[in-house]
Amino acid sequence: MSRDPTPAPAIDAAVDIRAHVCPMTWVRVKLALERLAPGAHLEVLLRGDEPLRNIPRSAAADGHAVVRTEPAGDGHRLVIRKGSEPC
Amino acid sequence: MLTEAQIDRYARHILLREVGGIGQERLLASTVAVEGLEAGGWLVAWLALAGVGRLLLDDAAAVSAADLAPLLSAADRGRRRDEALAAAIPAFNPDTAAAVGRGEAALRIRAGLPDGAADAGVIHWAARGDEAVVVPPGARLCPACAAALPAAPAAPAAASLAGSLAGAEALIHLLGRADGPRPVQHFRGGEPVRCDHG
């Protein structure tokens, strides 16, 4: 984390999807993103390879950007910046 | 805001770009008036399944065998159509409140074809014989196609097709996704009918 040259973005909201499986993982993230303003940052805590692959893919398809991915506990922490297109 | 049960119930809607959680909340906040319920069980079922929050049902005629699918049972025969369907809806989707009568509604779904073009805010639908027709607001069915519709009551497949198409048309309007005029949908034997009357 300390080697990442970009400053950590301020987190506007967080969603923990570690207890969910596909497709409810993306359902939860999408609902959380809908409540944010464009450009706001959402922290996502996830566990397992499937959401690690699919959440960034679904986010990109809807016009959002994953700006950070790092190990956290027994899973990963993503930071997604909400895009400007309506989702 | 959606409840946990609603997030599970409407997950497939939430995944759709055209609906999402915001669109689902919009559907749950909507009132649709359904005027005329002959063979209308499928239409009402689709609206309730989608989570339209309130239905106003209006049809005092008695339930016949053709009205039963998919919400009613043989025990409902002879009851008023609107009362029988309104009573069946809570067990089908507890999010949909159903009332009998007329009143304010964001959208009306009227059985039968319009004289000329359908009014704004009104979807017409008809199921006759093996044909299914949905006329969105502002659209009109070609008079020759209208005159050629069978007189026979709807076959079950035509009733379910017309009901599902009218229900889907309603969702498009409730979600604000009707960008400009929308076309008439007309099927015969489950296949789209191409009007060649000029």
Image (tube, coloured by chain):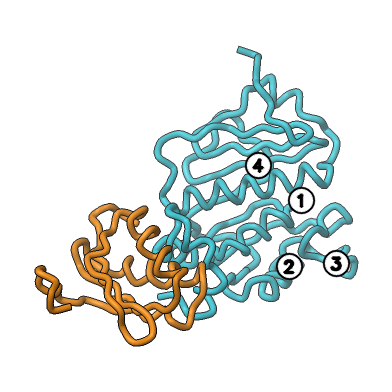
Chain colours: A orange, B cyan
Give the CA separation, mark 2 to mark 4: 21 Å
Which residue sits at x=28%, y=58%? A64
Q: Which mark is residue B83?
A: 2
The kind of residue on which mark 4 rests is: Trp
Q: Is residue A6 left or right of residue B65?
A: left
Number of numbered discs overlaid on the protein picture:
4
Name the residue carrying label 1.
B38
Name the element at disc 3: loop
Name the element at disc 4: strand
Say which label, 3 or 2, has the lower sequence index.
Answer: 3
**In the image, are marks 3 and 2 on the same chain?**
yes
Name the element at disc 1: loop
Where the N terminus of chain B falls, by quadrant? bottom left
Give the CA separation, mark 3 to mark 4: 24 Å
Nearer the observer, disc 3 or disc 1? Answer: 3
The kind of residue on which mark 2 rests is: Glu
Q: Nearer the viewer, residue A85 or B71?
A: A85
Q: Which mark is residue B125?
A: 4
- The answer to whether marks 2 and 4 mark residues whose Cβ atoms lie closer than 8 Å is no
